[in-house]
Each structure stands twice: as structure tokens, then as C-alpha cells.
Amino acid sequence: MNDETSTASASTPAASPLRNSTFGPSALLTPANGITGLRLLATPLLIALIMVRGADWVNFVVWGALSFTDGIDGWVARRHGTTRSGAFLDPLADKVVVLGALFALVAKSIVWWLPVAIIAVREVYITIYRSVVGRKGVSIPARTTAKVKTLFQSVAVALCLVPPLGKHHTVLAVAIWVATILTVFTGGQYYLDGRKSAAVRRHTSDPRDEV
């Protein structure tokens, strides 16, 4: 940082927080949370459409819109200020939307139940695990690989909804299994991250380790 930037920053100490963080970390009623809520409310509609129409261009467009709004609410959150409620609701909405679509695809016999069951178990387990260790003061930050996992899940669902691919079961199976492998891999990463963070916390808080 050069002297000119330092001087400008020092002369307007209150400008940056007001510009970059409209809402405090404890805020609940935020635009980003509103978008997240709409995604959750739209999930039953998506499930119903898949159950009625199966692999269909309308469903493909609806899925694309829901996936696009995932990026929108993240952008809005970064613009107005991240919140604790948003940090909880956004990944929850991701899981509800993806699992809802996958369960509907299983019910329509478009994908096999086993990879979907594996994905569901991982998502539920890691959500509970992060919540439990979080209550103990252990923070497990999000990983870039988890974002890649969510992307591959979204792509797998999108491919399953493309009508011309409906009879190409091998293509759909490969897509869903790649998403499953990434899901399990990132779950293992989170588990190990949690154990490492807990070990560090125990070590630093143990009075016997103090010099």
C-alpha cells in the first residue's frame, strides 16, 4: 500500500464499512437470504415438474435458473456483507435443491438410487458433523473442492434433464458417479479438517502445554 492510499484510507475510516457491509453479521432479513429462501420455496415445484415431465427442456431451464440464483445470492451476500444466517442457509439450500432433484430423478428411474443415497448420506453427515464440532468452537472453513463438487452435482442433474440424453444411460451414470466420488472425497476432507482443527484447539487450550 502506498502513502497516498494510506492517507486516503485514514481520512475516511467510516466510508469502507458502510460501502462494503450493508448488513451486520447477525442480520437475517437480507437480500441474499431472500434469494436463498426463494430457492428453497422453488424446490417442491422443481420436484413436482420432474415427477410429471421427467427429462424435459422446461425442467432443464428451471434447474438452470435455480443453479444461476445460487451464484447470484453469493454475489449479493459479498456485496452487502456476509451474515451468519447466510453462511448457514446458503449451503443448506444447495443441499435441499440438489437432493430434491436427485430423489425425483431416482423416482423417475432416470438415475440409479445407490449414488444418490451415497450423496445424501454424505451431505447429511457432514452437515451434522460441522454443526456438532462448531458448537465445540471448532471451525471448518469451506474448501474450493466443495464448490467444485457442487458444480459437478449441478451439471450431473442438468445432463439428466436434457431430453436427448434420456436414453444414454451410460453418459448419465458416468456424470452421477463422478459427482458422487467428488462428494465423498470432499466429505473426507471436511472430516480430516475437523479432526485437525479440534486437535489444534485442544493443544492450544491445554494448560500443561504452556511454557
Image (spheres, rainbow, N blue to C red):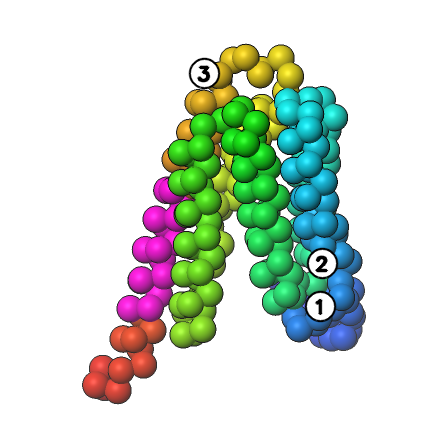
Tag in front: 1 or 3: 3
Q: Residue at x 50, y 21 (%)?
A: 172
Q: Main secondary structure of the magenta part?
A: helix
Q: Specify the quadrant that holds the C terminus.
A: bottom left
Proximity of marks 2 and 1: CB atoms separated by less than 8 Å: yes
In the rendered image, residue 106, in percent from the top left (x then y), is placed at 52, 31
Amino acid of disc 3: Thr
**Residue position marked by numbered label 3 in the rendering:** 170
**Mark 2 and mark 1: Cα distance apart in space:** 7 Å
Identify the mark at residue 40; answer none if there is no mark: none
Give the foreground label among 2 and 3.
3
Tell which circle, 2 or 3, labels the residue nearer the N-terminal end: 2
**Which residue matches tag 2?**
33
Picture quarter containing residue 101? Answer: top right
Mark pair 2, 3: CA separation: 38 Å
Q: Where does label 1 land, which residue?
A: 28
Asked if residue 141 shows in the view, the reply is yes
| Magenta segment boundaries in residue numbering | 184-199
